[in-house]
Amino acid sequence: MTSIEQRKELQRRIWQIANDVRGAVDGWDFKQYVLGTLFYRFISENFAAYIEGGDDSVNYAALSDVVITPEIRDDAVKTKGYFIYPSQLFVNVAAKASTNESLNTELAKIFSLIESSAIGYPSERDIRGLFADFDTTSNRLGNTVKDKNARLAAVLKGVADLDFGTFDDSHIDLFGDAYEFLISNYAANAGKSGGEFFTPQQVSKLIAQLAMHGQTSINKIYDPACGSGSLLLQAKKHFDQHIIEDGFFGQELNHTTYNLARMNMFLHNVNYDKFNIQLGDTLTAPHFGDDKPFDAIVSNPPYSVKWKGSDDPTLINDDRFAPAGVLAPKSKADFAFVLHALSYLSAKGRAAIVCFPGIFYRGGAEQKIRQYLVDNNYVETVISLAPNLFFGTTIAVNILVLSKHKPNTTIQFIDASGLFKKETNNNALLDTHIDQIMAVFDSKANVDHFAQSVPFEKVAANDYNLSVSSYVVAKDNREVVNIAQLNAELKTTVAKIDQLRKDIDAIVAEIEGEELEA
């Protein structure tokens, strides 16, 4: 099955599940149940595959729980980070779901036992609360236990029917595709909440390639506002054949999305000891500040959200913000995220950050921060993308690429606003478009109407304006007019009009003469 076929099959199945339950369950809530069930299925299959160890004679799902010794359990938790008994596996629960009168409470117990299996182990923090948003007793599923069980059974059956072979065989980001499909079809505010926007996979791919460009190995990858972890996982795909020493790091403010990010790591075979996702406010309660700086940073932070800013007098002395000498405006935290990322960036690394266009030309504090970035030679490239690439917004966003190892002081501007494919609801960035952007990013060549490398002195003289349109002249697509030919045609037309008027005057005079004679 090709990736396109897989994607269509996934969406068809999810829609089928929706038809069974969405009459009673709100679309946004429904998303949590499907994603939670997907996670439950694949964490079960992943664990069973680990226990079986490639031995076709072993079928973990068919074993009795009593054969599991404390030693087996202890060793498994140390390696995988959690434990699932055979009776708790998705395949066994789903098989009996439609006739299980205690399905909702049994599921709740299983999820609790999976999470508690990590207590006392290094993985406890990564496992705790993973199923918190999968509330099997919620009245959102129905007013009676029977109703709840019926809808839970429908979701379990629907997910069980997804046939993509083993997890390792899947050609697509199953979890990410499900997430993207669900938020684009069920959320009234598709993918946006408080300035947050879900990052489409192709945009994530571009950001990952920008951050990783030219590096054969990295120490670790970081996303300071990681959402569901899509940017980190695109980085993983890009660097599968390379060395990532310490793994994947991120921080997320929203508790539900924080759970999704951790699930997503497990679902992509990133073991608990290779990722560290933290919950909390990146700007005011950051994690990882005492760690070794990151060689690659990817980020799509929330646009223009409010933050404490100058209301907290300690922030101006924060090591992340102090060098700029000014804080980002309280009503627009965009540059606070940029300065945070810069502070966490290693001397050999790059940061690729999705930014709201307004921060590149507005005055005040934002202009002063741009001056700091330009004067210290941190700005490598600014890329303008096409509008309507993101669910829920038509904004034509920019990507800011920061580096601490530039070989010169020029700043590159790329106008990629014309690179997109028109689709039904959104524009789409294709692989060919990404290749075009990456090629000119690598070469730093000047290309008319597409890319210009500008001396920093010119940027400084332009009030540190970093808008792409200020340096890349848009192509004039207006029809070229031959003035001489146009003038000749006008002369001919005027002559014809004059002759027509004379003819009309003659006819009118003739008619008036006849009337007088009569």
Image (spheres, rainbow, N blue to C red):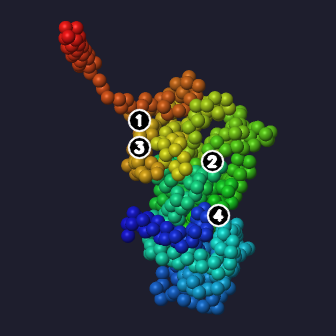
- On the image, numbered disc 2 is attached to which residue? 195
- Residue 200 lies, with reference to residue 310, above or below; the image says below
Residue 451 located left or right of residue 192? left
Q: Secondary structure at mark 2?
A: loop
- On the image, numbered disc 3 is attached to which residue? 419
| Residue plotted at (57% across, 42% down) | 355
Is label 4 or label 2 in front? Answer: 2
Is label 2 or label 3 in front? Answer: 2
Disc tally is 4
| Residue plotted at (44% across, 73% down) | 164
- The image quarter in which residue 75 lies: bottom right
Query: Which three-letter amino acid code belongs to the residue tagged 1?
Result: Phe
Mark 4, Cα crowd under 10 Å, few <14 / some 14-19 / many 20+, is many
Q: Earlier in the sequence, mark 3 or mark 1?
A: 3
Q: Secondary structure at mark 3?
A: loop
Cα separation between marks 4 and 1: 40 Å
| Residue plotted at (50% across, 53% down) | 200
Q: Earlier in the sequence, mark 4 or mark 2?
A: 2
Query: Which three-letter amino acid code belongs to the residue tagged 4?
Result: Asn
Mark identifier at residue 450: 1
Cα separation between marks 4 and 2: 19 Å
